[in-house]
Structures are given as structure tokens and as C-alpha cells.
Amino acid sequence: MYPAPFPLARLSPTFCQDVVIAISAHLDIDCLLTLRAASRVGDQLLAAEITTRCRKLFRGMLDDYEAFVRELDMTSSVIGSTAALRLLYPSTPQPDEIHVFTPNKLFFHVAAYLVHCEHFALCIPPHASGRRGHFAKLTKNGGTIKLVQSPSASPLEPIVRHWHTGLFAYVSARRFCVPYSSLTSQRHGLINPRSLLNYTHIPHSVREKIHDWKGERWRFTTMMKMTRWSRAQCRGVASIVCAAARRYFGDASCLGGPTLSLDDQEVPTYPYDALEEWTVLWWRSGETYGQACHCEAHVIDPGYRVCLRVTLV
């Protein structure tokens, strides 16, 4: 989401460029990636559209947009939650607050930048510690940024604690990732088992959230459906319905890629990138298929681990 201009060349001889740009504002990331795969102009269009959406997301809050993106890049911080959905799926409403996730040791670096360089007002609420980590709220001109401190060197760790899979998406200065894109594009979310009572029952607090999201035509389920056929075709952790099936940010099932185009050469480089070194691996839990599975365990609890990316690739 470094600044990128819209291409001067036409994407299609049928439409003028203004029409193409107007249409692209309504395309989700799946459609934009299709255009990227079609031509160099489509690649430039994706980069410019993500930049435009990000500028609109922070409209009225940032005095120097490019310097803010450099701060995100330098600290390996990411935009997540509903703000990431807004950038990747523009039909998502504008969020009330923008969630920015930072590595553990760089939380105060980002907070200091926003206070001293962008003149945000810092507010650390009492008991400013939630399921996703410690946080602070920064406000300016009616806008709010919720800055979340990861417990580890990976800024992605708090993301896997969100209550449904649609919120697992993130956007950084250089890349984006949607772990459950086939579901998210259909407004379908899997409820995080960690948000359930005994990993099976939906508590009242989550039911209230489901009611709010259903107003935006979202549907939710607690787990993938298991059938006799799926049990017979079980391939262990490689099966999507396996209780111990492992996922991680950047795996083959994720929809992801660079936010930069091939022509974006004049961007700063930094000696270290936490997103390149660390990722988060998780499994959803559930019932096993039989006594031969996982040391005869009948149920596997949900969990996650922060891992070096090189150990998973």
C-alpha cells in the first residue's frame, strides 16, 4: 500500500480508463488478482486500488500517508480485523476503529510515531488487555486506531484469536493474506473454537456478534461438516475436516500476494522483516475419526504456535 498511481495505459480498449478505475473500486481482491494475472496494467491497477482504499480508510487522520506506511513497513506491523476486510472486500462497511497489530517489542515505537509525528491522542483504557493482547487507542479528528501489541515477535499472533475466520485477513505495507478466501468471499465465517464454551456451544456474547454481522449478510458455522465419505477419505492432517489439520499464514490454501506492482521499484528496504521470518500455525480442533487417530484421542483441543517460517515451507 505504498503510494502507487493508476496506470495510464488502458486495461481494455472497450472502456475508457475512468470507467475502469470506477469499476475497480467495487472489485474484491479475488477479482483484482484476476486482472493482475491478465496483464501488467492489471497488476498496476491492483496496487493503485489498494493504495486508494487505504488512503480513504485513514482519511482525515494522517498528515503524511507515505511516512505512516514506512513506519508500518519498518516495524512489520499489519492492518487487520474489519479494516483489512474493508481494504480487500470493499462491500465491507467502514469500521469504527482501525486495528493495527505490532510485534511485541515495536508496539511503543508505533505508538510514539503516531503521537509525536501524527499528533494522535493516546488513551490506554483501564485493563487494556484482551484476548488478543495489550492494546492502546489513538484518536484524531474523530478517527480511532486500536494498536494491538502481539505477545511475540510475530504481529500475526493476535489475529488467530479473532472470533471468526473472516477476521484472519491482514494487509501489510508490502503484502496481503486471506487464509479462508473461499469462505470470506461468500461472507461465510467459521467460528473460532476458542470463542466457544467447551469448544462446542456458542456463548451469548458471540451470539450478539453473530446477530450484528448477519445484518451484513454473513453466515456462520462452528466447524466443517463431516460425513461418512469424508471419514472414509481421511488422509490425516492433510484432510480439510481433520481436527488436527494445520494451517498457517502463507500456506498453499491462503489467498495472498504483494500489494506492490512490478513497476514499484522506488520503495525503501529494511534489513529485517518479522513477517518474512515468523508466521503462526493453528489447528481448529474437533472429533477424531477413530481409535487409530492421534494416540486414541477422541477430541483434539484447538491451538496455535508461533513458528519460524522456514520450518514450514
Image: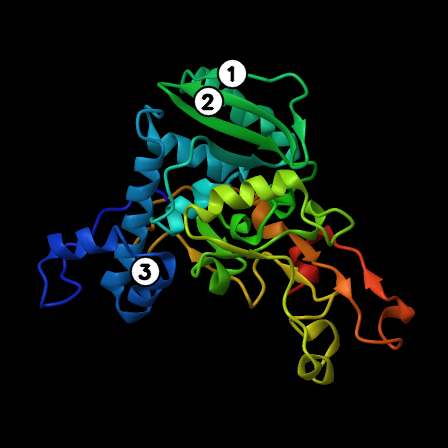
Neighbourhood count class around disc 1 (C-alpha, 10 Å): few under 14, some 14–19, many 20 upward: some
Establish if 256 lies above or below 172.
below
Q: Earlier in the sequence, mark 2 or mark 3?
A: 3
Circle 1 sits on which residue?
122
Question: Which residue does the image show at 68% across and 20% down from the upper left?
Answer: 127
Question: In the rendered image, which quarter is residue 16 located in?
Answer: bottom left
Q: Are marks 2 and 3 in contact (CB under 8 Å)?
A: no
Q: How is the image coloured?
A: rainbow
Q: Amino acid at mark 2?
A: Leu
Residue for badge 2 = 114
Image quadrant assignment for residue 299: bottom right
User: Given this view, does label 2 or label 1 mark the residue nearer the observer?
Assistant: 1
Q: Residues within 10 Å of mark 3 (few under 14, many from 20)?
A: many
Residue at the image position 38 percent from the left and 46 percent from the top? 92
CA gap between label 2 and label 3 equals 31 Å
Q: Position of residue 48 (x, y in %)?
A: 27, 49
On the question of residue 143 being in view, the answer is: yes
Q: Are marks 2 and 1 in contact (CB under 8 Å)?
A: yes
Place residue 93 in its image quadrant. top left
Callout 1 amino acid: Leu
Disc 3 marks which residue?
A: 32
* Residue at 84% in and 73% down: 293
